[in-house]
Each structure stands twice: as C-alpha cells, then as structure tokens.
Amino acid sequence: MTTTGEDHIGAGGGPWWWPRWRSALLDISLAAASAAECAADGVQFSRDAGLPVPVGTLFGLITGVTLLLRRKWPVAVVLVSIAITPAQMGFLMGVVGLYTLAASELPRRIIGALAGMSFVGMFIVTYVRAHQGLVRGDLSIAGGFIPFLSVTTALGLTAPPVLLGMYVGARRRLMESLRERAHSLERELMLLAERAEERAEWARNEERRRIAREMHDVVAHRVSLMVVHAAALQAVARKDPEKAVKNAALVGDMGRQALTELREMLGVLRSDEAAPVRPARATALPAEPATAAVALVPVVDDSAEGPCLAALEELVGQSAAAGMVVNLSVEGDTRSYTPQVEQTAYRVVQEALTNVHKHAAGAKTHVRLAHRSEEIAMQVENEPPPEPGPAAAVRLPSGGNGLVGMKERVSALGGVFVSGPTDAGGFRVSAVIPAQAA
C-alpha cells in the first residue's frame, strides 16, 4: 500500500510508484501546471531578490516539478511548498500537497504538525506582504484589517485541502475495509458450503446405514427361522406329517410377517420422499461455529411404528417353535419407553437370537431383560451347541454385520454394548441403554 492508501495493481499497473497509468498522467499534468506557475512566479522573485531572471525561472521549474513525488513522499512535497512560501510561489503545490498528505496513512500528529506549519508560514507571509503594501501605498485598507486578512488567506489555502484529504482518506479506508470484509465473507460462505456438503454426505451415509440395519434385522431373523423350519420340515415330512404341516404353517406365518415389516419400512421411505426436508442431526460431527450452515437432507422418522418390548415374548416364542430351548426372564417393573429405545432393545434381542440360529443351532439360550431406574439392560447368552443334528446341519449365510449394527444402534442412544464368547464355550451379547421414558 502506498502512503496515500491506494492499492497496487501488480499486473498491468502504472510506472514506478503509481498504481495505474491514469494516476501517473494526473500527477504529470499537476506537476506541469505547478512548474509553470512557479516559473512565472520565479520571474518576480528574481527581480525582488536581485537575481538574474533565468535563475529564478529555473528555480521555479525545479521546485514545481517536485509535485510528481506527492504520492511517494507527500511530506517532502509539503515541506518544499512551505520553504518556498516566502517567495510567493508554489500555491498549487501547497494545496495539492496538503490534500495528498491528509489523505495518506501517515499518523495524524504528523499531518497536523505540517498543516500547522503551512498555516503559520502562509499567515506570516501574507501579513508581511500586506503590511509592506500598506506602507508603500499599494493597499488602501485599514491597518487593523491586516491580521484578519492574513488569517483568512492562511485558512483558505490550508483548511479546505486538509479537510477534503481527510474525508477522501477516511472514505478510501472504509471502502477497503468493506472490500476486505466482503472477501472474508465470501471465503466463509465457501467454507460453509463445503461444510454443508460434507454434512449432507455424512447424513446420507448415516441414513443408508440405518436403512441397512433395519433391512438386516427384518430379513435376517425371519428368513433364518424360515430356513430352520424348512430344514425341520424336510426331516419330518415323511415320518410325522402333522408336525410337517405345523412347520409349514410356521414358515408361512414368518414369511408373511417378514413381508409385512418390509412393506411398512418401504412405505415409510416412500412417504418420506414427498415430505419436506428437515435439518439433519449432526451430533456425531465435530463442534462448529455458530455461523455454520445446517445440511438439509431427507431423514426417515425414527419414531415410526416398529417393534416394541411388548412383542418380545412373541419373538422368543418363535425361536422356541423353531426348536431352540430358550427362556425369557424379566426383572423390575415393566414400563414404556421412547420408540427408539424399545426398537433398539427389541432389535438387539432379535439379532442375538438370529446369531444363535446361525452359529449355535440347538443351543440352550437365556434371554434376560432388566428394567432399572435410569436404564434398561438386556442380555442374550447361549450355552455351547449340542452335537449336530438335522436342524443344526443347516448352514445359514452370515454377512458379518449383525454385531456391528447392534453396537451402532446402542451407541447412537448413548448406551454400552458388549459381546464375546463365554468361559463355558457359549456366546454372550449384553447391552445397556439409558432409560428415556415415553
């Protein structure tokens, strides 16, 4: 930045210290006018001082050309104008120099000191010249009017350029601050847009994982039971037709239940497509400034109708009907919770039972549910599987996402999930979820 507060333009700028060519042309024109004025005044100065006229003219030309430096060294230009004030030349240089000085970024005390020096110099010169003219008879004014004339002349040649320069400098600084602020806001908006895009992508991925968990829980459990019943049906079809008929009916019931749950889920997704978007929750994202934008993405309502703890006995009964030896124990006073808590607790037990069907068919299983004051706990533990039988010989496919999905569900509600083998050779799945009363 130059001393006048103007910005440099790197590519395509003006010559030397000028920011642009039009500024250089303006200063050259002002310097030419100042040189012509000083050269003309130098003729009278050389006569008054008893010097040859060419000397006075050359002196005026040299001092007038210094106005070219007003943008680079405004202090020097003002000092030169003050120095030649007794010679009654350089009035244009003084006015332009004071304006440039006041518009610059120099400290106000320097500007005030130089403006005061210019005022005093102009006042003294005007007073002396007016007194000399009054003595010679060139002026026909009262002697008491000379101080007023001197003050008025000095103020007229110093105050307007200083005030105008201060106004232009303040306006230029204001425009520069507004421009910088606009650039910073533009950069901030770009960052916020990038952040919003990241949050939208995060929300979409979270929604995909949530739907994948729901689809896995709905399909895996029902289909696993259907496969187990189908295997048992194949084994007893000829030996016990009545039991085969019963197993076939169970397979049909479970298939219909699976289809019903799938239709409900797809119905929620389709209805959500036409629903207006709402801000996606971003609790899993790092903290952001208050000015951060919120990504708008479609989110499926977690409170939609789904399984609840009241259907837990039916879930355990279905596994028992498939040949699993399973018992359910409930501790504490039964009460209702928010849909998210009840669905999560149900899905944990459902997936744990599904894993028993897949990996430990025929093993005795214990399901425990505990209602506590501030949390709800569930545990599914199976004993080591028995010798492989007809039902245990069925190999069920596993995607390896069941335990991961259960942990994600429980962690999303602020709970704790633990799973792993037991010392007796079985497997245990435990989860504790903060109790959020309905």
Image (tube, grey):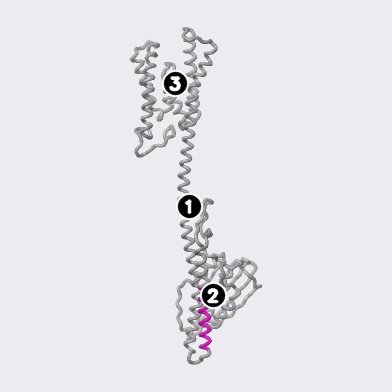
Q: Is residue 256 magenta?
A: yes
Q: Residues within 10 Å of mark 3 (few under 14, many from 20)?
A: many
Say if mark 2 contacts mark 3, CB within 8 Å: no
x and y, in percent, of residue 256 in the image? 52, 78
x and y, in percent, of residue 200 in the image? 48, 59
x and y, in percent, of residue 126 in the image? 48, 15
- Image quarter where the C terminus lies is bottom right
Q: Is residue 198 magenta?
A: no
Q: Residues within 10 Å of mark 2 (few under 14, many from 20)?
A: many
Residue 82: which numbered mark, if any? 3
Residue type highlighted by circle 1: Leu
Q: Residues within 10 Å of mark 1 (few under 14, many from 20)?
A: some
Label tally: 3
Q: CA distance from mark 2 to mark 1?
A: 42 Å
Which residue position is annotated with label 2?
A: 350
Region rendered in magenta: 243-262
Residue type highlighted by circle 3: Ile
Residue 104 vertical placement versus 374 (above, below): above
Q: Mark 1 or mark 3, which has the lower sequence index? A: 3
- Image quarter where the N terminus lies is top left
Q: Mark 2 or mark 3, which has the lower sequence index? A: 3
